[in-house]
Amino acid sequence: MSRLTPRGREIVLAARALVEESGPAALTMRALADHLGIKAPSLYKHFPDKAAVEAEVIALGLLETAEALEAAEERFARSAPSAPFVPEPGAAVDEPRTLLAALARAYRADALAHPHVYLLATERPLPRHALPEELEARAAMPLMRACDYDVDRARAVWAFAHGMVSLEIHGRFPDDADLAAAWRAGVRTLER
Amino acid sequence: MSRLTPRGREIVLAARALVEESGPAALTMRALADHLGIKAPSLYKHFPDKAAVEAEVIALGLLETAEALEAAEERFARSAPSAPFVPEPGAAVDEPRTLLAALARAYRADALAHPHVYLLATERPLPRHALPEELEARAAMPLMRACDYDVDRARAVWAFAHGMVSLEIHGRFPDDADLAAAWRAGVRTLER
DNA sequence: ATTATCTATAGATCTATAGATAATGC
DNA sequence: ATTATCTATAGATCTATAGATAATGC
């Protein structure tokens, strides 16, 4: 994004909106051009091909995930200074009690806030060559820190969170499933 | 499958082979017909539309998953009669020690044995109306039994397993990641 | 009679290139 | 001069229907 021209940025934002509105398959050069009020061939003066546009949308998604997790880390650090959790009488009940719970909640909220972009960014190989250096690593860091740099546990937690979100977005759980309870069950056991 | 004509079955098997060979997007009525040595319009005498063929491939995938998990359950029941695990001197080290570990291993092996069919069957909404009654429930039962019918934990375990497999198939882990270790970390903590 | 196939074809799309034209920035 | 746009168009696909033809099963 940062290395794009202003017009390039506009195009990517329109592409993102298109994906979010109608799913990854709806991102065609024609639909994108329509959205922008221009003709499809004009897009090729800004991007070499469709894959380049798609990669920028994916980069946006990853960046947002990274920022959402970093913000959750910070909020948690502020609200839970150090001592073990002690529920205050009358305090809101649903504050996350652990850093991992806070990150899990943020991960889910971010993914469900733009499910189609989430799927575009996760359910296919990453176009790593077209992404900003270090973006992938940055998105992974909050979980690594929460897992005390135990990479195996961090990967297991990531897989759990991704699996929950993926299955939820694709409507694979029963309609009446208590997904909050499933998240709690997973986070609680993965906690240590 | 069972409710198909013999020719219908051949068509579905060819479709399955096509998906497995070249991915879900490669399943087109033309490519399928080519594979069978006929012309595309002929397929419409056997299936009303492409979605119907796809649904049968998905049903095959689900059925295989169910059978793989059931077989793993049975193998585990035979090999680990009841007593807590005691490693015998000189015994093979990599026998799964718990039912959950056995199921996790079977889930991964099944998915990686035909990754494209796995993705077709999981990374989109299920065409439930076109699937055999109870197939979805059957595929879910082994995990439910392993989790003592704690549905929240069963869903968490499923999400973990699906997430691991999905991320692995899409090449989202680093090439040198020790995925066996991540599986162990996840299964161990989700164990209870 | 029914079934499986075929040819021909309608009707939608897609991505991407070539080359012309208008507008903007020195 | 450069940049952003346009029109025209090549070249690939796709799904699905209509109607003809050949083969099979009573």
Image: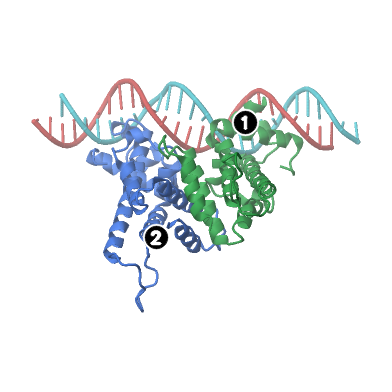
Chain colours: A green, B blue, C cyan, D red
Q: Secondary structure at mark 1?
A: helix
For disc 2, the marked residue is: B101
Above-or-below relation of A166 to C19: below
Q: Nearer the viewer, mark 2 or mark 1?
A: 2
Query: Is residue A114 visible from the viewing direction of this image?
Result: no
Q: CA distance from mark 2 to mark 1?
A: 47 Å
Nearer to me, B40 or A24: A24
Q: Residue at x 40, y 57 (%)?
A: B104
Q: Residue at x 54, y 31 (%)?
A: A22
Residue B49 percent coordinates (x, y): 36, 31
Q: Specify the label residue B131 is tagged with.
A: none
Q: Are marks 2 and 1 on the same chain?
A: no
Nearer to me, A175 or A81: A81
Above-or-below relation of A147 to B133: below
Nearer to me, A12 or C7: A12
For disc 1, the marked residue is: A32
Q: Secondary structure at mark 2?
A: helix
